[in-house]
Amino acid sequence: MTSEGIDATGTTPTDFEKDTAAKPLGEGRYEINLSDRWWIGRGPNGGYVAALMLRAMTAEVDSTRSGQPLPARSLTVHFLLPPSTGPARVEVTIEHAGHVTAFLSARLVQDGEVKAKAMSVFSGEREGPAFNQSKMPDAPAPDDLEEMDTEQAPVAVFGRYRAKFIEGFPGEARERAETMGWIRLRDEQAVDPVLAAAVLDVWYPAPFVVFKKPPFAPTLEYTVHFPRTIPGPCPPDWNLIRLTAEESAEGHFSEDAELWSRDGKLLAKARQMALLRHRKG
């Protein structure tokens, strides 16, 4: 990026791209800067942390390859401590690299403390048998729905997105923990793996819809799978997100999330293990 804020492609980066930028320092180290525009509660949204780490890991893979870049296939993040706003580092290690597959680990370090750890697999396209039993949920088209006023959301990060609610709203006391809607970045940016990692954690958790008073749900572990190379470049558009949870027990729950393109392609899936706590007051 130049001093005028223009990147190498000649376009102005979005706020998301600027706030997930990773400056190479050499030897697998990347300088990042956490912005409170993506905050929830007393720390950053977990998807934002995942996006920061995946951005640095992607840059490290790309820096080692002279040919076609390898797409991310899997990312797992463990959240040890909440980072604060300001500078930090992501330290990336290529654990093993083959011709079309690379395994990476990373640590997010701030003020001498490890705040998060991640593992990722990057793997190129191969010839092989294929099948597809995925089915996009039935949903009204985004053009037929009214847009939510996300800028008035109680957490900063949700205001960075546009959203159209379909079903499963916090506080409804529904029988099933399931919520769904259309979502897109407020800036005009098409979805890519880094943005998908953020989006899949930004919608309110599915258990919120089964309680009259939504609880508190900090994430412990977050995994994203990319079953196909997300097509690009493509114009920005709405993506369908659905979250479900089967149960909560012993103060924990596991949640599944799906991200679909408007034309019915499964772009990414996520699963997370999180705590479920009563809110004070």
Image (cartoon, grey):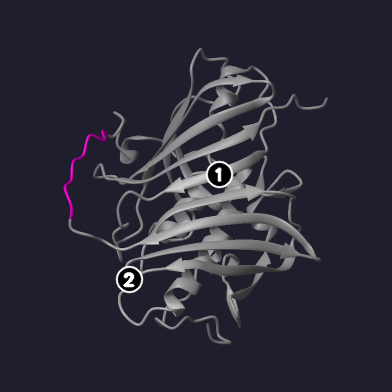
In which quarter of the view is residue 155 placed? top right
* Most common SS among magenta residues: loop
Image height of 183 relative to 107, above or below: above
Furthest-right residue in view? Answer: 281
What is the x, y in percent for residue 139?
Answer: 31, 30
What residue type is disc 2 on? His
The residue beneath circle 2 is: 99
Q: Residue at x 30, y 74 (%)?
A: 68
Q: Residue at x 55, y 85 (%)?
A: 4
If you read the primary sequence from the N terminus, does the residue marked by circle 1 or circle 2 appear first? 2
Q: Residue at x 49, y 57 (%)?
A: 120
Please state which of residues 63 and 83 is positioned toward the viewer in this rendering: 63
What is the x, y in percent for residue 133?
Answer: 22, 34
Q: Residues within 10 Å of mark 1 (few under 14, many from 20)?
A: many
Instruction: Point out the stretch of residues depicted in magenta.
Output: 128-135
Q: Secondary structure at mark 2?
A: loop
Q: Which quadrant of the rendered structure holds the C terminus?
A: top right
Please state which of residues 256 and 260 is positioned toward the viewer in this rendering: 256
In the rendered view, does 255 fall on the left or right side of 129? Answer: right
The residue beneath circle 1 is: 222
Image height of 64 relative to 46, above or below: below
Please state which of residues 195 and 66 is positioned toward the viewer in this rendering: 66
What residue type is disc 1 on? Tyr
Q: How many marks?
A: 2
Furthest-top residue in view? Answer: 175
Image height of 53 relative to 132, above or below: below
